[in-house]
Amino acid sequence: MNYSVVVEVTLRVGIADPEGATIERALPALGFNGVRSVRAGKMFRFDIEAESSDEALTSAQSLAERLLSNPVIEDATARLVEGR
Amino acid sequence: MNYSVVVEVTLRVGIADPEGATIERALPALGFNGVRSVRAGKMFRFDIEAESSDEALTSAQSLAERLLSNPVIEDATARLVEGR
């Protein structure tokens, strides 16, 4: 069966995030106030073939940690979603 | 009050996604089979100050569409999340 997966890759707490900091600094000049703690990350969506949803999630999580993220500075979380 | 927001920025359907295509092509050689339709995107997390959750969401969605994405080729979706 095919399962749809979303993987979120975020920088670990304490790792500098220059992209997020730049966005945060730019927002007030663009008319958005009250926005704090901006953190930028990556997202991947894919379909994975597996026998069960557990197997799909395990294999997506391992793929996310090994190939889609740098575990030294990033956390990767996989979750199953309905459709796309 | 402060609300935590996640914004997901994905390429619109039909827009070529070379990053996703490269990942998809590389996976079988790395031991992951049965993965299809890989799409790469971006993710942002931030805290926003607003009077109500509705106001927070509206302002996050407008920020996402105007500043965090390129509406010609990307879709942006904001959603509120608990904590971080």
Image: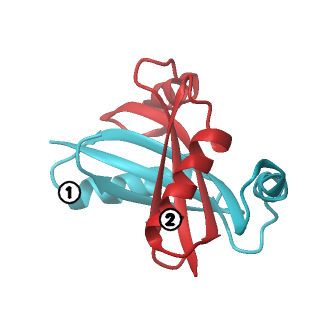
Chain colours: A cyan, B red
**Which residue sits at x=58%, y=72%?**
B50
Residue B1 shows in the view: yes
Percent of width and height locating residue A45: 41, 42
Instruction: Please report, as a chain letter, where disc 1 is located.
Output: A
Left or right, residue B60 beside residue A27: left
Circle 1 residue: A53
**Which residue sits at x=40%, y=24%?**
B13
Circle 2 residue: B55
Percent of width and height locating residue B36: 34, 31
- Up the image or down, A83 lies above or below A18; here it is above
Three-letter amino acid code of the residue under disc 1 = Ser
Percent of width and height locating residue A13: 70, 74
Three-letter amino acid code of the residue under disc 2 = Glu
**Which residue sits at x=37%, y=39%?**
A46
**In contact (CB < 8 Å): disc 2 and disc 1:** no
- Quarter of the figure with the N terminus of chain B: bottom right
Left or right, residue A74 beside residue B55: right
Which quarter of the figure has residue B60? bottom right
**Which residue sits at x=48%, y=61%?**
B57
Percent of width and height locating residue B66: 63, 40
Left or right, residue A50 beside residue B16: left
